Image: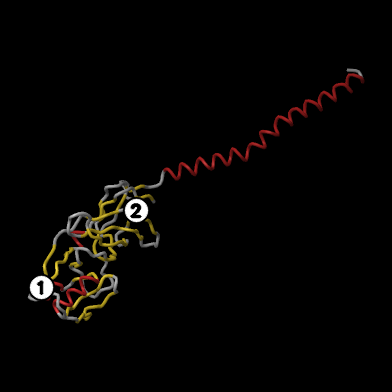
Amino acid sequence: MNIAQRWQAKPALFMALGLISAAIAPIAAQAPAIANSNSYQVSQLLDSARIVIPAGTVINVDYDDSDNDEEVDKVIIKPDETAPLTLVVENDIRTASGTTLIPAGSTITGELQPLEGDQVGTHFVANELILPNGNEFDLDAVSQPVTRTETITEDSDPDIIKGAVIGAAAAAVLAEILGSIDILEVLGGGALGALGILIFGGNTEEVDVVVVNPDRDLDLTLQSNLRF
């Protein structure tokens, strides 16, 4: 190759290198976007793979009597009364592979609420699930309706309320009827202990109350999926 040809080849080589660089530059510029896109897809997959406890699952519960010196046998409220209540999960809720999702001892907060329509009674409506590690989850779950009522009069045996926690409205009326009642706790009013005594006395002669057995009546059914 003569000198003239060598000088002509150099510009051609530089032009070729320039074209290659120009072709590589857009690919390099797109690399971060591809990485971000992949990260987003992975995030979506992880989110869509969240563990779900399906609607219809039953959670066995009991009344949380950890603040009382005696075991709570019953909850007594008026049929039209709304009362706050805390329940405790009795059994682990596990996946098919054995992973525990809701450990026994987790607490569930909510309210006893009057039944709608013409039904007389109450049911528990859950608000929140609190795991032993402190994690909290919104909970859409309810108990079966409780329609068992009792009429309490001046002649009723005061032992009918022994071992009971009582809604504030029911406690006030029962104290008027019975004159003096010894109760464990007024719901929403704090624990009174075994010596908590309400003494009133009044003109009320009888009252209908709903009697809830917390060990039997308050098991909860999920109304919608619970996602972890």
Mark 1 — residue?
153
Left or right: 27, with 209 as reference point: right
Check residue 101 in the rendering and tell me which mark sits there, or answer none: 2
Crowding at label 1, few (<14), some or many (≥20) Cα neighbours within 10 Å? some
Check residue 202 in the rendering and tell me which mark sits there, or answer none: none
Tell me the CA gap for discs 2 and 1.
46 Å
> Where residue 65 sits: x, y (%)?
25, 69
Residue placed farthest to the left in the image? 155
> Where residue 153 sits: x, y (%)?
10, 73
Crowding at label 2, few (<14), some or many (≥20) Cα neighbours within 10 Å? some
Q: Residue at x 41, y 43 (%)?
A: 49
**Camera-nearest residue between 97 and 158:** 158
**Which quadrant of the figure has residue 165?**
bottom left
> Which quadrant would the N terminus be assigned to in this image?
top right
Q: Is residue 179 above or below residue 40?
A: below
Q: Secondary structure at mark 1?
A: strand
* Dot 2 amino acid type: Leu
Q: Secondary structure at mark 2?
A: strand
> Where residue 47 sits: x, y (%)?
44, 45
Q: Residue at x 81, y 28 (%)?
A: 14
**Which quadrant of the figure has residue 33?**
top right
Mark 2 or 1: the one toward you: 1
